[in-house]
Image (spheres, rainbow, N blue to C red):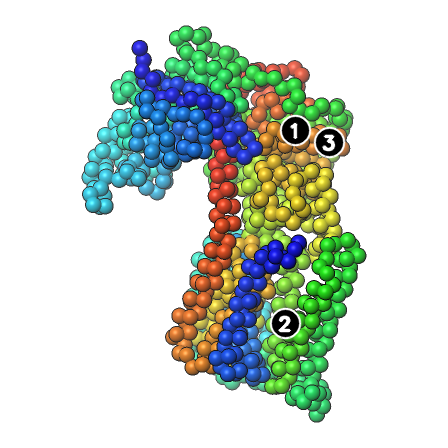
């Protein structure tokens, strides 16, 4: 593969990443460098963590065949309300309450998954009903009131920062040395992991890229990781939610790209009938995807209620739309079978940075909505148009062939 | 002297890899009923699609003259303007619209875009009377029987001022009584309205009943046109025309690989329709396959062969399934497709695009999908092993593609079919059910697929070979079950039978069965 085709092939894949970098540079300039200040990066993470968590779950739903979950915003609110009631009203142990909240999330997922996968109610309808039901339950539980504040132990899981083990030692003048050390460690582990897999692939006779490209890639990624942690270390350190988020991203990336379940998800979205006739248990898979979605929604519920430091009946409104938008901006296909966790992260970041950048510039939230809507439209339009030639010939060819086959048979 | 209404000259239509029509000539005279007969895949429907503009001018070669005028239809509208109306085998009525609305669909009775309901239903009533259907035109299509729907289709054609009515298998889903009614109607319309008809059918008794002339098509060529008045037209005569061809070098040499051991047995297998659960689609079928044996199941479309195969394959089709499956002497309870696969049964679907392949995925991902456990450990895919395995199968079946990363949607029909076979051979079956494994595949790829089948048999696999091509069944199988209307009506050895006698058996059974 020469350079040109490599670039062309990857251009579309990385287009949104390029757009993201462009947006970052754009706002960095317009806000006179406020965007990438340590405090603002910390803010960005807090502001977007729950959207990313929801979007990852939503991606799996979309992969199975363009199914979406409209109820996640309400689930976020309901889980927050449960946490508030357990901890604030009844004074239960925060740690056990969190565990219980996650179990409630799973139970909600079982409910939704049952209707969608086994009774075969269209996901759109079942989750629209869920959206109303769970919002209503939230209002009932909270009696329309907001519960606040949460104890410190509850907040520590998401709005807290990792503790500084090297208090007093300010390496390179950063405020939180542990964060910097952690960043360097992660960069190192990542590089070693990549080099190791490169070696084993080469040994097994795979075609591998030249070691220079690998080195270049590793240096860039490692530098980015260390820079991010260095910046965070200059504020209050690494937020706890960043760790949660990192784990979720790694786990689901791995799940979708390297496991049998992941492959079955893509197969189901690609051609459900063929997947079923190949022994993929499509119903069971659809069920699990919705259980998982509600589970992640409950994680997001805990993260979000901690960020608000209250259980509010209005929490999570229209979160489902942000999550869905992130998936589609990130390149997921509306008919399923296409999309990655990485792409979804990029999609969520584009939305998040637009929000944040415009807020810093003092643009009103009304205008922000318009911009976000247009960005979603532009991203998907770009995708459709850039695929147009390829896609149109492909689909029309397909149609023609199918018709021909019908002819041949009849 | 009769006037020529339609003449199609030297029509040739090619699809990628397949020549569907090869210099077909057909002449239809004004006021006659002209039948077109031929085996499945002979090119009958393609010819009619050329005539009605579904395959537009330019996508075929040859000339069409209608009333002496050359036609260059670009779409169905063009042909309908001349009064050429085609009624497809699958009726094209909208179930939740009324009879009247359906009749004037695309041809609405309106004034400035506002529909004139009085006129719609008044006219609809008139046309319904013409076809002898006493039904309120406000009735929804879903509420009337298929036989009546067929009549509505004909009335709809009349509403379009039809001159030449083309009926593609008009009676395939009707019982004998209703079928006779439709045929009588066509005769009546000719008499009273002077409407010329072309009928495509493989029910030869019906053709004998109503057709004036019969054109036989075989492998995309016109064989002959018989005139009822001049020739002595009998069913035997037509069958000979339909199937008569040499089959010397079209099949690879079959060695006798049959072992004594019975590998697979199905006993008293009965399946009901998936949606219409009172309808029996497979009726008390019993069959067996020995190791290394290729057993054919021949039947026309709708004979229940696919339903039989899919219901065996972990109940992938059907409801209320009863009967037993015995593999190597052991009774199997297969409640899911995954169980069937792990028990060593593979089903290669007849419809590779709809049911068989992930067109937007790579060859590799398609091949390994049925048995991910072969290339994974603890749920984690060993990508190196997967790649190596896929490479191996791609080479084994000589799939022509740059590498296994290629999207299946970009491959030719023959290569797609080989990917489908690779996928199911990879899943290590003992019993392989092949449903129309050579459909939509060119002659060269067909031969390769036959060779693969022989190779599998010589490895001791038991093979059930479903096909609607008689030559293929006779050329490839050690033993043949003939299926009709859900039942196995005959079991024959290819050495002791002919295509004519198999066709005859089916036609006799259809007569009695209705």
Q: Which chain carries label 2?
A: A
Mark 2, Cα crowd under 10 Å, few <14 / some 14-19 / many 20+, is few
In this rendering, position of residue A206 left or right of residue A92: right
Q: Name the residue under label 3.
A: B455
Which of the 4 image quarters holds residue A375? bottom left
Whether residue A4 is situated above or below residue A365 in the rendered picture: above
* Above or below, comparing residue B95 to residue A294 in the picture: above
Q: Earlier in the sequence, mark 1 or mark 3?
A: 1
**Other-residue count near label 3 (Cα within 10 Å), few / some / many at <14 / 14–19 / ≥20:** some
Regarding residue B87, the answer to whether it shows in the image is no
Q: Mark 2 points at which residue?
A: A246
Who's the residue at 38% across and 35% down the image? Answer: B74
Q: Which residue is drawn at 50% across and 17% down?
A: B223
- Spatial CA distance of label 2 from label 1 is 54 Å
Q: Where is residue B3 in the image (x, y as percent from the top left)?
A: 31, 15
Tell me if I can see residue B51 in this picture: yes
Which label sits on residue B447? 1
In this view, the residue in front, A211 or A180, is A211
């Amino acid at each position: 593969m020469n350079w040109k085709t490599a670039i062309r092939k990857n251009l579309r894949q990385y287009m949104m990443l390029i757009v993201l970098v462009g947006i970052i540079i754009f706002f960095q300039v317009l806000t006179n460098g406020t965007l990438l200040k340590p405090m603002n990066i910390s803010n960005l993470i807090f502001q977007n963590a729950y959207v990313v968590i929801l979007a990852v779950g939503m991606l799996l739903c979309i992969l199975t065949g363009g199914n979406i979950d409209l109820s996640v915003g309400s689930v976020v609110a309901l889980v927050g309300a449960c946490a508030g009631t357990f901890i604030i009203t009844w004074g239960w142990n925060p740690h056990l309450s969190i565990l219980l909240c996650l179990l409630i999330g799973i139970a909600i997922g079982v409910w939704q998954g049952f209707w969608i996968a086994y009774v075969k109610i269209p996901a759109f309808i079942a989750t629209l009903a869920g959206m109303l039901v769970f919002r209503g339950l939230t209002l009932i539980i909270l009696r329309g009131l907001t519960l606040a504040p949460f104890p410190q132990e509850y907040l520590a899981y998401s709005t807290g920062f990792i503790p500084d083990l090297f208090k007093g030692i300010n390496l390179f003048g950063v405020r939180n040395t542990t964060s910097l050390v952690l960043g360097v460690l992660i960069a190192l582990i990542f590089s070693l992991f990549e080099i190791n897999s490169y070696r084993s692939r080469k040994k097994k006779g795979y075609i591998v890229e030249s070691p220079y490209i690998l080195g270049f890639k590793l240096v860039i990624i490692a530098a980015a990781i260390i820079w991010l942690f260095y910046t965070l270390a200059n504020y209050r350190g690494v937020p706890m939610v960043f760790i949660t988020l990192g784990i979720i991203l790694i786990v689901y990336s791995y799940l979708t790209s390297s496991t049998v379940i992941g492959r079955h998800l893509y197969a189901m979205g690609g051609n459900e009938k063929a997947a079923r006739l190949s022994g993929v248990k499509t119903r069971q898979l659809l069920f699990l995807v919705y259980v998982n979605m509600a589970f992640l929604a409950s994680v997001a519920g805990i993260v979000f209620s901690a960020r608000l430091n209250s259980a509010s009946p209005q929490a999570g409104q229209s979160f489902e739309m942000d999550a869905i938008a992130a998936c589609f901006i990130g390149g997921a296909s509306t008919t399923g079978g296409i999309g990655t966790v990485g792409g979804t992260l990029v999609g969520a970041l584009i939305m998040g940075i637009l929000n944040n950048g415009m807020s810093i510039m003092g643009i009103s939230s009304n205008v922000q909505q318009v911009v976000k809507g247009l960005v979603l439209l532009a991203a998907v339009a770009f995708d459709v148009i850039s695929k147009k030639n390829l896609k149109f010939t492909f689909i029309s060819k397909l149609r023609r062939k199918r018709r021909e086959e019908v002819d041949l048979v009849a | 002297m009769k006037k020529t209404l339609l003449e199609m000259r030297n029509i040739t239509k090619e699809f990628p890899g397949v020549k569907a029509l090869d210099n077909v000539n057909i002449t239809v005279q004004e006021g006659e009923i002209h039948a077109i007969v031929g085996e499945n895949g002979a090119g009958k429907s393609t010819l009619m699609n050329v005539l009605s503009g579904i395959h537009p001018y330019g996508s075929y070669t040859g000339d069409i003259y209608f009333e002496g005028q050359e036609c260059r239809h670009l779409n169905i509208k063009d042909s309908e303007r001349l009064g050429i109306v085609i009624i497809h085998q699958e009726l094209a009525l909208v179930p939740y619209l009324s009879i009247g609305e359906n009749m004037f669909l695309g041809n609405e009775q309106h004034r400035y875009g506002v529909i004139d309901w009085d006129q719609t239903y008044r006219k609809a009533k008139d046309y319904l009377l013409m076809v002898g259907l006493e039904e309120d035109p406000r009735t929804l299509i879903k509420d009337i029987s298929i036989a009546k729907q067929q009549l509505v289709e004909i009335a709809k054609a009349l509403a379009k001022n039809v001159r030449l009515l083309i009926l593609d298998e008009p009676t395939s889903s009707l019982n004998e009584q209703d079928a006779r009614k439709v045929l009588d109607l066509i005769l009546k319309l000719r008499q009273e309205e002077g409407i010329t008809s072309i009928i495509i059918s493989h029910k030869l008794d019906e053709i004998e009943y109503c057709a004036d002339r019969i054109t036989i098509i075989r492998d995309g060529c016109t064989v002959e046109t018989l005139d009822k008045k001049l020739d002595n037209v009998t069913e035997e005569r037509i069958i000979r025309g339909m199937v008569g061809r040499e089959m010397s070098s079209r099949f690879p040499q079959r060695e006798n690989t049959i072992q004594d051991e019975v590998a697979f047995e199905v006993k008293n297998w009965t399946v009901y329709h998936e949606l219409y659960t009172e309808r029996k689609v497979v009726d008390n079928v019993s069959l067996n396959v020995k190791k290394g044996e290729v057993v054919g199941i021949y039947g026309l479309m709708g004979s229940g062969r696919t339903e039989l195969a899919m219901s065996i394959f972990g109940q992938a089709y059907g409801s209320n399934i009863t009967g037993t499956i015995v593999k190597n002497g052991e009774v199997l309870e297969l409640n899911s497709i995954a169980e069937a696969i792990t028990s060593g049964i593979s089903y290669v679907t007849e419809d590779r695009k709809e049911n068989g392949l992930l067109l937007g995925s790579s060859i590799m991902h398609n091949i390994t999908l049925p048995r991910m456990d072969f290339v994974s450990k603890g749920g984690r895919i060993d990508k190196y092993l997967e790649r190596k395995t896929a490479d191996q199968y791609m080479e084994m079946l000589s799939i022509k593609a740059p590498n296994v990363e290629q999207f299946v949607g970009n491959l030719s029909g023959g290569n797609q079919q080989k990917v489908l076979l690779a996928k199911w051979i990879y899943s290590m079956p003992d019993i392989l059910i092949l449903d129309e494994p050579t459909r939509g595949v060119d002659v060269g790829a067909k031969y390769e697929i036959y060779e693969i089948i022989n190779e599998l048999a010589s490895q001791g696999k038991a093979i059930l070979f479903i096909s609607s091509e008689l030559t293929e069944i006779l050329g490839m199988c050690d033993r043949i079950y003939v299926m009709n209307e859900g039942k196995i009506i005959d079991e024959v050895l290819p050495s002791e039978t002919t295509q004519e006698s198999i066709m005859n058996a089916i036609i006799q059974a259809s007569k009695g069965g209705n």
